[in-house]
Image (spheres, helix red, strand yellow):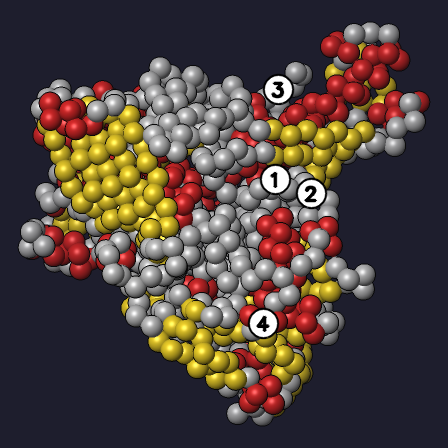
């Protein structure tokens, strides 16, 4: 490979930025089609009710109203969901949370649709609801679905946990609680749909997965997928929340029924009330260790509240159970994870996907273990750290790219640098340091993942990449451009990405699970290498030399002092362009359903973080003063985008740790940014240091692997450990709001 | 309540005289009447700052201002600050400092920063933090954003 390192690892500026800073990038609500009408979704105010009747007669008389559509108007499948399709698009029979959709009103203007919506009369028979997952598991609880309230039970089994705990010198046991949180992407959900004259339909949407939009719309309308085309518009954040295309289906249904282009966009309150959340967990953990702090066994019961629907809950719970040992080797494992239905807003994918919860619980116990055996928190982690010889919770030994011990060393240096500040706490503040660590599989854990890329080299040396992994703002487009540019010896400015159109880009699954760099980075690399090989072989024949001795640079194939332009080469061989397709699928083996054992992922990424916090004794308010994130990327492709991801993930984690909680009282009771508190510029620590560790992953593109969720995974844990150290009381519940911390300070048993 | 009134407003140096419904917000007026969609709507309750514009020299949430209140006003939107082909130093600094991810908060953030630097060309870190406190960013690299604003302040001062 020539020129390796010319482009990989360089701080190359992303190409979408100028349009974004100028307000010229087009998001879905910026799109207006001639004759476009608007849809508003009517939602249930009741957590559980039977829909007896829907009377739209008055609404239909409202000026400008074109249609009021209900479940009966759906020609195909009335179900939607990322993995398990168990949510009705429009509920015809029963609503299962306050926010479930029952009708969609179409009108000439947004305002007319809104006014008419208030005139639709739904006759509900209110049914008993169960709002708490532990109560939902009890016999006799109201059923959310006919098959019962336990949506999934996933197990991990290894060794004799009971015996190991019996013999352990130290046994720690606690119950931990985490909360429901909202993605709060700045751009709410939305879609525009238009029927084309040949009987197909085109969707423009804010999405993490255009091909899923296509699948869901095609199922709903009973159309072949090939007749549904989805364009992803510039998307204002996703974080796992834009994987269920409900707005897309509503817009498509209106367009299909009325023949008019239609826009459906969610208001902010609607987005918070109805879109899926991060699963709240109740976690019972029991940890056994030797008196030297060596872990022997873990027993865990994890109950995740999946709300009214399971679409991602089974996979989220599986992720937690398969990561129950964190970045440590624990010989004996018994873990049971349950995704439990309640009559609350559904929970699904959110950046972290089951890891932030378990990291908070496990890392809290690791700190308690350190205290109990009289070790430094870093040292107790070091004694149990995974390396390239020890198995994960699923029994997989990672043979390379496990820099966890080195990362712990670096985090120790960061935490040590905070120590001189401990004595400098102002009067009325208590100061503490905490560390938090985590690991995560890159890509899905329950099934294999595949990415496909089509790379085309034109005779002028420019390149197009068609690959269906869309950029949500994290910078995956520039990553793919850098990978192809490195292989093909061109400047990234000569590369055009085609990711956001199902008609030209292959389905690569969703932009989620930290998978894009590892999977699509590889697919792009492999396709670009095929193109390069073909070009060099052609040129080798013409120049009478070994292709291995040739270099491809800026549209010229060079051999010593001689060279041939691509234009001449293509012309001579009657190629208009050279295209190659490649795909990448990591080698995995499925998890055993009884033991949870198997080599479920191609690679893992590690995170080690340290936080310095102040706790106000008077108010209980926590302020994160310093934060140090050590991040494992395999190999760095672009330092600007990586650092942006890290600081962004840390900030989102600080919100999870301190202020964010979606409250449910019937329905969501805090659906605004005035009541649901995401971090602002005032919540940023004085310093967020980012350290990148490079320990190449042999199966990754140029050694790279994913890391985006790992930036957030251990933040709740690190901040909780810092707060616990500051106040001398173990925190067992997130978020650590002022009220809660104040109570812990003044009534430690509360 | 759905009466129409003419709104005569100077936007980015050009006078527009366009009828608006009396309860229409300035954000909707800009976006849907005039097609100036660079101004974003993230919450419509004044909590996120995505719709920030400068009205008569002050940064305001255009979702909390009625279009009719802008009658006779001077308004600067993101379109008036620079274009992708001719970037303002603030916009260039956002790009150079990696302060742009999904980009949805960027127009409002840049307008808020412009308003700050117009008033206080030598704004300190704490002023910057305060000026963007009402602008939420969920990709949330406030560190890069603040650095970009400080760097742009330097460039603008040097150019004067």
Sequence order check, earlier mark of 2 and 4: 4
Q: Nearer the viewer, mark 4 or mark 3?
A: 4
Which chain is indicated by disc 1? A
How far is disc 2 from disc 4 in space, using C-alphas? 34 Å
The lab-note entry on whether marks 4 and 3 share a chain reads yes
Residue in front for this viewpoint, B55 or A475: A475
Q: Position of residue A665 (x, y in %)?
A: 29, 68
The lab-note entry on whether marks 1 and 3 share a chain reads yes
How far is disc 4 from disc 3 in space, using C-alphas? 58 Å
Q: Position of residue A201 (x, y in %)?
A: 72, 60
Which chain is indicated by disc 4? A
Query: Secondary structure under badge 2?
Result: loop
Q: In which quarter of the view is residue A252 placed?
A: bottom right
Which residue position holds label 2? A505
> Mark 1–mark 3 contact, CB under 8 Å?
no
Which residue position holds label 1? A508
């Amino acid at each position: 490979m020539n020129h390796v390192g010319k482009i990989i690892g360089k701080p190359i500026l992303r190409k979408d930025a100028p349009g974004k800073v100028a307000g010229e990038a087009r998001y879905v609500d910026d799109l207006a089609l001639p004759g476009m009408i608007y849809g508003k979704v009517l939602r249930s105010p009741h957590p559980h009710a039977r829909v007896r009747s829907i009377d739209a007669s008055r609404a239909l008389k409202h000026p400008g109203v074109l249609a009021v559509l209900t479940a009966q108007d759906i020609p195909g499948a009335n179900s939607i969901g990322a993995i398990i399709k168990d949510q009705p698009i429009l509920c015809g029979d029963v609503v299962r949370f306050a926010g479930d959709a029952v009708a969609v009103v179409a009108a000439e203007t947004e305002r007319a649709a809104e006014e008419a919506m208030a005139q639709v009369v739904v006759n509900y028979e209110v049914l008993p609801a169960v709002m708490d997952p532990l109560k939902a598991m009890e016999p006799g609880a109201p059923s959310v679905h006919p098959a019962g309230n336990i949506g999934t039970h996933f197990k991990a089994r290894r060794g004799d946990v009971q015996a190991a705990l019996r013999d352990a010198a130290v046994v720690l046991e606690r119950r931990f609680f985490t909360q429901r949180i909202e993605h709060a992407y700045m751009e709410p959900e939305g879609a525009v749909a238009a029927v084309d004259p040949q009987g197909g339909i085109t969707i423009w949407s804010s999405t993490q997965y255009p091909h899923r939009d296509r699948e869901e719309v095609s199922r709903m309308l009973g159309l072949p997928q090939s007749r549904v085309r989805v364009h992803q518009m510039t998307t204002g954040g996703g974080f796992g929340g834009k994987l269920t295309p409900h707005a897309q289906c509503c817009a498509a249904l209106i367009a299909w029924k009325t023949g008019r282009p239609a826009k459906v966009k969610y208001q902010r309150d609607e987005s918070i009330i109805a879109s899926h959340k991060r699963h709240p967990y109740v976690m019972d953990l029991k940890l056994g260790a030797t008196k030297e702090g060596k872990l022997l066994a873990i027993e865990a019961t994890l109950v995740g509240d999946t709300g009214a629907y399971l679409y991602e809950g089974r996979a989220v719970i599986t992720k937690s159970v398969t990561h129950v040992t964190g970045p440590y080797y624990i010989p004996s494992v018994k873990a049971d994870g349950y995704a439990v239905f309640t009559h609350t807003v559904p929970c699904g994918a959110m950046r972290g996907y089951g890891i932030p919860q378990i990291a908070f619980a496990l890392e809290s116990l690791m700190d308690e273990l350190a205290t109990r055996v009289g070790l430094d928190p870093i040292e107790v982690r070091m004694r149990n750290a995974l390396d390239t010889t020890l198995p994960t919770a699923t029994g997989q030994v990672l043979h390379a790219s496990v820099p966890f011990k080195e990362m712990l060393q670096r985090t120790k240096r960061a935490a040590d640098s905070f120590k001189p500040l401990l004595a400098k706490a102002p009067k009325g503040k208590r100061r503490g340091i905490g560390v938090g660590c985590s690991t995560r599989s890159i890509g899905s854990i329950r099934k294999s993942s595949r990415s496909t890329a089509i790379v085309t080299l034109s005779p002028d040396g420019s390149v197009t990449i068609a690959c269906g992994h869309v950029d949500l703002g994290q910078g995956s487009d520039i990553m793919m451009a850098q990978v192809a540019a490195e292989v093909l010896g061109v400047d990234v400015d000569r590369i055009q990405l085609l990711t956001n159109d199902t008609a030209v880009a292959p389905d690569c699954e969703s932009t989620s699970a930290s998978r894009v760099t590892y999977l699509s980075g590889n697919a792009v690399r492999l396709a670009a290498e095929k193109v390069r090989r073909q070009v060099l072989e052609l040129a080798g024949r013409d120049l009478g030399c070994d292709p291995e001795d040739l270099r491809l640079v800026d549209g010229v194939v060079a051999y010593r002092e001689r060279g041939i332009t691509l234009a001449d080469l293509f012309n001579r061989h009657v190629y208009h362009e050279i295209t190659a397709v490649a795909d990448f699928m990591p080698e995995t083996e499925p998890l055993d359903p009884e033991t949870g054992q198997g080599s479920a992922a191609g690679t893992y990424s590690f995170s080690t973080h340290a936080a310095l916090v102040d706790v106000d004794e008077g108010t209980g308010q926590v302020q994160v003063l310093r934060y140090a994130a050590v991040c494992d990327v395999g190999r760095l492709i672009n330092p600007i985008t990586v650092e942006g991801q890290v600081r962004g993930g840390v900030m989102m984690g600080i919100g999870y740790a301190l202020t964010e909680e979606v409250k449910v009282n019937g329905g969501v009771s805090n659906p605004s940014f005035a009541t649901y508190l995401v971090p602002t510029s005032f919540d940023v620590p004085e310093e967020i240091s980012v350290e990148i560790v490079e320990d190449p992953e042999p199966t990754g593109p140029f050694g790279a692997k994913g890391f985006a969720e790992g930036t957030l995974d251990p933040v709740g844990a690190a901040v909780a450990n810092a707060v616990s150290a500051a106040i001398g009381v173990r925190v067992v519940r997130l978020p650590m709001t002022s009220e809660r911390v104040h109570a812990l300070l003044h009534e430690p048993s509360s | 309540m759905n009466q129409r009134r003419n709104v005569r407003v100077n936007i980015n140096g050009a006078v527009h005289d366009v009828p608006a419904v009396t309860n229409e917000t300035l954000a909707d007026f800009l976006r849907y009447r005039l097609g100036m969609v660079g101004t974003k709507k993230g919450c419509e309750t004044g909590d996120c700052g995505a719709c920030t514009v400068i009205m008569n020299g002050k940064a305001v949430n255009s979702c909390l201002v009625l279009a009719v209140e802008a009658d006779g006003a001077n308004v600067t939107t993101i379109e008036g600050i620079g274009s992708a082909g001719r970037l303002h130093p603030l916009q260039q600094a956002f790009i150079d400092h990696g302060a742009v991810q999904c980009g949805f908060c960027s127009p409002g953030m840049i307008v808020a920063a412009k308003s700050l630097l117009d008033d206080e060309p030598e704004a300190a870190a704490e002023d910057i933090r305060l000026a963007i406190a009402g602008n939420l960013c969920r990709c949330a690299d406030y560190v890069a954003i603040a650095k970009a604003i400080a760097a742009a302040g330097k460039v603008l001062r040097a150019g004067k």
